[in-house]
Amino acid sequence: MRRYSKTYYKFLLLFLCISQGFQAHSQFIGYRIDSSETKSVFPFELINNLVIVPVLLNDSVCMKFLLDTGVRTTLLTEGNEHHLEVAYNRPVRISGLGTSGEIEAFVASNVKLQLPGITGRGQTLIVLGEDYLNLQSHIGQDVHGILGYDFFSHFVVKIDYSSKKITVFESETYKPPSRYSIFPIKLVKDRPYLNAAIIQSDGTKISGSFLIDTGASHSLLLEPDSINKISLPSKTLPAILGWGISGAINGKIGRIKLFSLGKYNFKNVVSSYGASLRPAEQLIPDRIGSIGGEVLSRFTLILDYKSEKLYLKKNYNYHRSFSHNKSGLNLVAEGKEFKTFSVVHVLEGSPAAKAGILQGDIVVAINGKGAAQLSLEEVQGIFHSKSAQMVEIVILRDKQYLSYSFWLKNLI
C-alpha cells in the first residue's frame, strides 16, 4: 500500500484549502458544490481505517475532520486552541459513553465550512469545552473535529478506500452506478442502518440491523444481550474498544464464524463486544451492532441518504484477513509531531506483559527504528503482524532506557 509523508499531507492540505479555491457565492444555507459541475472529487487520508478530510472553517483556519456516518451534528474539538472567531450561542451539557459522565460543550451557529469544491453555510456546530475525545493521540495525526449527517444528507457521497478519494455528487442529478451491489438503508435519528447477519462461534445465525459507522476503525461491534441472543465466543480478550466523549470504552474482542452482507461473506471476523459506541436506538428493536472501517474499507461505497440506498463494490483489500493486536500493548501518540508513544494499557498474560512492559512506559524504539522514524499507524501495523514474529522494543521508564523482546502471538 502506498504511503505518503506527513510533510506531503501538510502541503496537500494547504493546496486543497487555498489553490482549489473554496469559491465565494451568494448567501445560502446548507451545503452545495461550488462550481457548475455536478460533482467534486478530492483525496483524503486513510488512517487506521478512518477517513480524514480537509476542512476550512470561517475562511480562516485549515483543519482536518473525521468523516463519520455515526454522528448527527458537526463536532469541533479544538475551538479554543485555534482562537477561532466562532460565536457561541449557549452552553450545553452532553453525555457520552465512557467513564466521565456529562461534559461541557457549546452550540455555535451560522458557521461556514468548506471542503475542496464544496461550501457549507449557516452550519451548527457542537464545540467541546475541552478536547475530551483526544482524537489526535489515538489517531496519531492532527484531527480537529467530526463531520457527519449534516454533510452526508446534502449529497451522494462515494468513498473509494483504494484510491483514497471522495467523490461528492449532487443528489438531484445523480445516476446510480452499474456493477455495484445495492442495499436499502434506513435513517433513524439521522444515522444509516442496513440489514446483515452473523453466524456465531456456536453456529447460531442472527440477522438484524447494523449501524454503518465510518467513524469506527473496528470491523464489527456486537451488543450482546438476552433479547438479540448475541453471546460471547468461548475465547475472548478484554480490550479498549474505543474512546467516547467521556473516556475509554471497555469491552471484549473475539471471533465469529461468518459475517454476511448480501452476497458478501467474511469468515473468522474479529469482533468487538460491548455497549454501542453510539447512543442506543430504542427505535430499532432488531439492532445487533455496527459495521466499522475494517469491513467498509474492503469496498468502494456510495451513500445516498435521500434515496436511502447504499452501493458497494469490493476492492483489492476484500480478501485481507482479519487481524488483531498480538502484542497486548495499547499506545497513544503525544508530543511534537505525535512521536512520543505512551503505553496506556498492557493486556494481562500477553507477550508484552510477560516480557515486563508496564503501563506508563514510553516506547522510544521498535525493531531498530527510533520513534521519530515511526507513526502510530506503523507501530500498530507491527503489532498486527503475523504471529511468531519477534518484536524488539526499547522503552523509557523512570529516566532509564530498558530493552525487551517478545514474540507476537495469536491471542484469539
Image: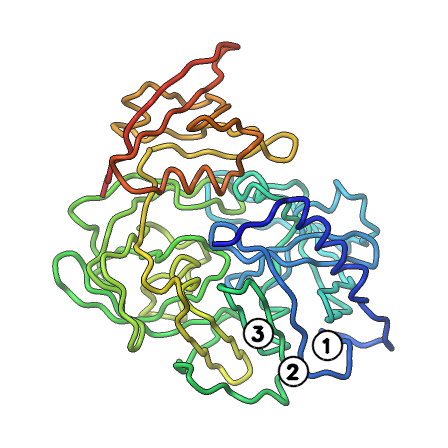
The Cα–Cα distance between marks 1 and 3, rounded to whole angstroms, is 12 Å
According to the picture, the residue beneath numbered tag 1 turns out to be 33
* Residue drawn at the location 62% of the way across and 75% of the way down: 168
Lateral position of residue 101 relative to residue 23, left or right: left
Tag 3 and tag 2, C-beta contact below 8 Å: no
Q: Secondary structure at mark 2?
A: strand
Lateral position of residue 228 relative to residue 98, left or right: left
* Residue drawn at the location 63% of the way across and 48% of the way down: 143
Find residue 263 and report its horizontal and vertical position in percent: 29, 77
**Three-letter amino acid code at the position of disc 1:** Ile
Tag 2 and tag 1, C-beta contact below 8 Å: yes
Q: Secondary structure at mark 1?
A: strand
Q: Residue furthest left?
A: 202
Find residue 406 and report its horizontal and vertical position in percent: 30, 26
Tag 1 and tag 3, C-beta contact below 8 Å: no
Quadrant of image for the C terminus = top left
**Three-letter amino acid code at the position of disc 3:** Val
